[in-house]
Image: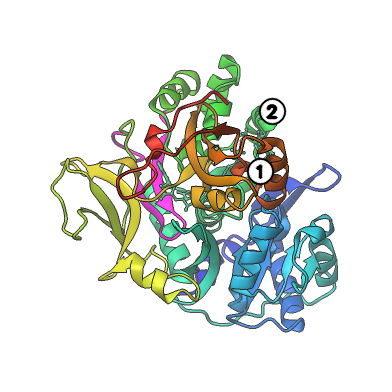
Amino acid sequence: MSLLELYDASLLGRANQPALECAKADGALLSLQFADLETRSNRLGRLLTDRGLRSGDRLAFCLSNRVEVIDLWLACVKLGVIVVPINVMYKTREISHICADASPRAVVTTTDRAGDFPSGVELWDVDTVTALAQSLPGDRCAVQSRADSPAALIYTSGTTGVAKGAILTHGNFAANALSLLTAWQITPSDRYLAALPLFHVHGLANGVHCWLASGCHMRLVERFEASRAVQWFEEYRPTLFFGVPTMYVRLLEVPVERARAIGAQTRLFVSGSAPLPASVLEQFADAFGHTILERYGMTETLMNVSNPLIGERRPGTVGRALPMVSVEIRDAHHRAVATDCVGELWVRGPNVCSGYWQREEATAAAFVDGWFGTGDIGVMSPDGYITLQGRRSDLIISGGFNIYPREIEELLTSFAGVHEAAVAGQPDPVRGEVPVAYLVCEATTDFAAIETQLRQELASFKVPRAYVRVDALPRTALGKVQKHLLPSRET
Ligand code: MLC
Ligand code: AMP
């Protein structure tokens, strides 16, 4: 099945229903029906075809949330073109790696970002592309994709710190959408407030797909801003909100009476991408009158596990396996462990990616007999609820964005005078964790200079919040750094 057939229930079946609203450049609200999205993406599809893009080619985008990302996604799905989202916060170094690895035909972006791209990468200005497409025919031109046709390469890192493109197929996105629609009972009468970035699977595979597959209404905002969130909730009156824990922490600042009123009009608040602290769940329930529904997924697998819509949302757990998804907790020898015993989560189902782009070894290492090893450690209760307890690999999640310490450590040790470096996550009440760098270095090492350089090479959320000079890194007899023994520190 092509994703297009799933979307057609709304694109064609609900053509004259309101579909989407978002702010235009002048601040006025742009309202579109599903038929408008169909026409806009057909026109863009013509332009992409005229520019030589064909099924299987890659096209990247590096954009904040805006309607053109939706146009681009729909046009590419229709043409079988593989979309490569790039995090807008990435700097030249990070972008260069993705462009070299995915070799997109072009990157759709804004002119102010041109300096962040390596030479040789073709850049298309989003406004120019949109304006040119407007004069092209609006009738549909689509190829037949299959469930196993790649729809997107979404970059995510392993322990090596080198980002790999997870190949997500039409079938992966379709299965994920159908699973969530069923589990969370999303219907055309829902109203979804979309504040998650569309360059990650939480915003794209869950948000956009629950919207398109249900034919509900979506309000798209450029990015989550705590100071504007109350206004969005009060004006738009969403029934659905998906967020990372940091967004819920920010929403706790909403005055209690307004929080109650927002809670009364909202049907479902979902959290994922990082652990939701039990204290936030409790405080949110007190203020908004809702127990946030926590679920668990990852880029490579989309959504695996969810607390139930109806039934017990058990605090501290991520719930039970979603429809169509098999989850097993295994020991290091791939044997399933008993309930209440700790092990690694392995998953299998139509939601799991087909592998990593042009990385046969990494793909082979990730799968055993069709099961995908998530690297997440947890336990399953006798009634199937899963509690996550950590990760097999070194990962910091800050505000829902993943940070691989190894990437930062390699940069740090490239500075003159830095002999050894370890980057560890330090608890943070808002972002969950923030990175802190521990350095074995010369007395003359200038942390300010290191920070300036890192800011040019890394997305801001990866830049350490503090630098700590240590005499030596605590290591095991085998030389592995014991990060839990590093001194904690006020940032
Ligand atoms: C954050 N920043 C952005 C941005 N979001 N910059 C540009 N575009 C965006 N969309 C930058 C800010 O400029 C700032 O930079 C820093 O991040 C913090 O911003 P803030 O305004 O202080 O926001 P805050 O209230 O802390 O909230 C941050 C946040 C953001 C929640 C809005 O962290 C966010 O959007 N997180 C979502 C991540 C996500 O979608 N993850 C899903 C991955 S998929 P500076 O320079 O001040 O640091 C996955 C699988 C799964 O994990 O299970 O879902
Ligand atoms: P990403 O690589 O960005 O897709 O991040 C996926 C990782 O986020 C998972 O492997 C988990 O470690 C983490 N994650 C996602 N959802 C949750 C959750 N609800 N609680 C804890 N960790 C989560």
Q: Tell me how many marks there are.
A: 2
Residue 314, percent across and down?
A: 30, 33
Q: Quadrant of ligand 1?
A: top right
Q: Given the image, on which type of amino acid does mark 1 rest?
A: Ser
Q: Nearer the viewer, mark 1 or mark 2?
A: 1
Q: Quadrant of the C terminus?
A: top right
Residue 391, percent across and down?
A: 36, 46
Residue at the disc numbered 1: 460
Which is more toward the observer, 387 or 361? 361
Q: Where, by quadrant of the figure, is residue 355 drawn?
A: bottom left
Q: Is mark 2 within 8 Å of ligand 1?
A: no
Residue at the disc numbered 2: 227
Which is more toward the observer, 367 or 416? 416
Q: Which residues are magenta?
A: 291-312
Residue under the image location 58 percent in, 77 percent down: 80
What is the secondary structure assignment of the residue under circle 1? helix
- Residues packed near mark 1 inside 10 Å, few (<14), some (14 to 19) or many (20 plus): some
- 53 is higher (above) or lower (below) than 296: below
Residue under the image location 64 percent in, 75 percent down: 103
Query: Residue 330 shows which numbered tag?
Result: none
In the rendered image, residue 68 lying in the magenta stretch gets the answer no
